[in-house]
Image: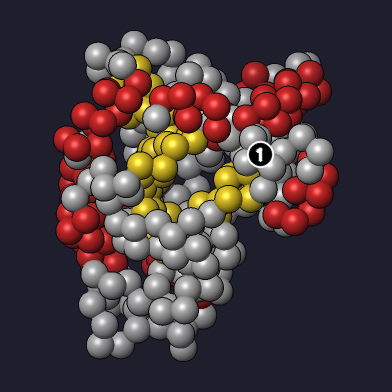
């Protein structure tokens, strides 16, 4: 497993967290939206089925421009004791220590819950390091689908053999940005980056630009309890949510360092909408 991670830049691990506990988290999250028109009538928050008569843009999650009431709900969800406890799940933490060999791991407090309704914009193409430039590049990202997520349901897709591409792109950026003030140089939204912090929203076009040095876009049918781990340079994005059952994609992306590492201190506070990162 460690060899595959080193060679491929990611590893998809089944059944890291008990399935029902993942669905408990899903139910808790969507219960906070039960009084809105985001969920389909007469359905359980545990299922998280989108109300197809609603406008998905009104209920955009992180990275979107949701209505003010949705922003407030997102802020509350990220600070909730239930979510903070989920982040400390002993099965997840024990696996990370075993996999990395670290005596103690440190999670960045700015973990994120990303929901994506069918028909809304998905997360664009990126690698994680350019969002965390003010810390070491030796960290582990854990992507946790909170509920089953089909290949058509908005899950992550990885660009095969792209670790070197992420590293090359970052070197090019640092060369261009070397004369910028530090605050702007470490900003994923600076003058040399796309306005929304992503390299592209067009997976086909991006692949065509780099096809000589990378492989395919890879995606899978993720299940509750799975976790995908990837390195800071692996190029990835989310698919468009076209789930045939109308399920809202919910996932959390977490970053772990070895205790004592040089952290990007901007990420040591709980996520809040419009926090500038």
Is 66 on the left or on the right of 214, as rendered? Answer: left
**Residue placed most toward the observer, 203 or 193:** 203
Could you say which quadrant of the image residue 222 lies in? bottom left
Local packing at callout 1 (Cα closer than 10 Å; few below 14, some 14-19, many 20+) is: some
Residue sitting nearer the eye, 187 or 226? 226
Q: Position of residue 228 (x, y in %)?
A: 41, 42
Query: Where in the figure is residue 63, as x and y percent of width and height?
Result: 54, 54
Say if 54 sits above or below 239 in the image: below
The image position of residue 56, as x and y in percent, is 51, 75
**x and y percent of residue 140 in the render?**
43, 28
In the depicted structure, whether residue 19 falls above or below residue 92: below
* Residue at screen point 53% across, 31% down: 9
Q: Is residue 205 above or below residue 69?
A: above
Q: Nearer the viewer, residue 224 or 28?
A: 224
Q: What residue is rendered at 64% in x and 50% in y?
A: 217
Q: Is residue 238 visible?
A: yes
- Find residue 27 and report its image quarter: bottom left
At 78% from the left and 24% from the top, the residue drawn is 172
Quarter holding the N terminus is top left
Q: Position of 21 compared to 57: left or right?
A: left
| Mark 1, residue position | 189
């Amino acid at each position: 497993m460690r060899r595959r991670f080193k060679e491929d830049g990611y590893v998809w691990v089944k059944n890291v967290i008990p399935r029902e506990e993942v669905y408990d988290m899903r139910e808790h999250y969507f219960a906070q939206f039960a009084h809105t028109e985001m969920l389909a009538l007469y359905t359980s928050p545990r299922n998280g089925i989108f109300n197809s008569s609603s406008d998905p843009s009104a209920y955009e999650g992180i990275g979107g421009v949701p209505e003010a009431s949705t922003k407030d709900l997102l802020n509350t969800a990220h600070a909730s004791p239930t979510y903070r406890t989920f982040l400390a799940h002993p099965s997840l933490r024990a696996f990370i220590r075993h996999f990395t060999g670290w005596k103690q791991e440190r999670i960045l407090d700015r973990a994120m819950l990303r929901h994506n309704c069918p028909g809304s914009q998905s997360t664009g193409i990126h690698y994680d390091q350019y969002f965390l430039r003010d810390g070491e590049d030796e960290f582990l990202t854990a992507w946790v689908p909170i509920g089953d997520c089909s290949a058509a349901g908005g899950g992550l897709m990885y660009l095969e053999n792209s670790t070197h591409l992420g590293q090359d792109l970052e070197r090019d950026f640092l060369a261009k940005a070397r004369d910028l003030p530090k605050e702007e140089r470490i900003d994923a939204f600076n003058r040399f980056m796309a306005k929304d912090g992503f390299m592209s929203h067009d997976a086909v076009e991006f692949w065509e630009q780099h096809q000589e040095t990378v492989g395919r876009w890879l995606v899978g049918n993720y299940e509750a309890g799975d976790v995908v781990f990837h390195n800071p340079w692996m190029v990835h994005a989310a698919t468009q949510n076209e789930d045939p059952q109308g399920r809202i994609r919910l996932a959390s992306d977490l970053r772990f360092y070895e205790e004592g590492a040089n952290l990007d201190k901007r990420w040591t506070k709980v996520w809040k909408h419009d926090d500038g990162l």
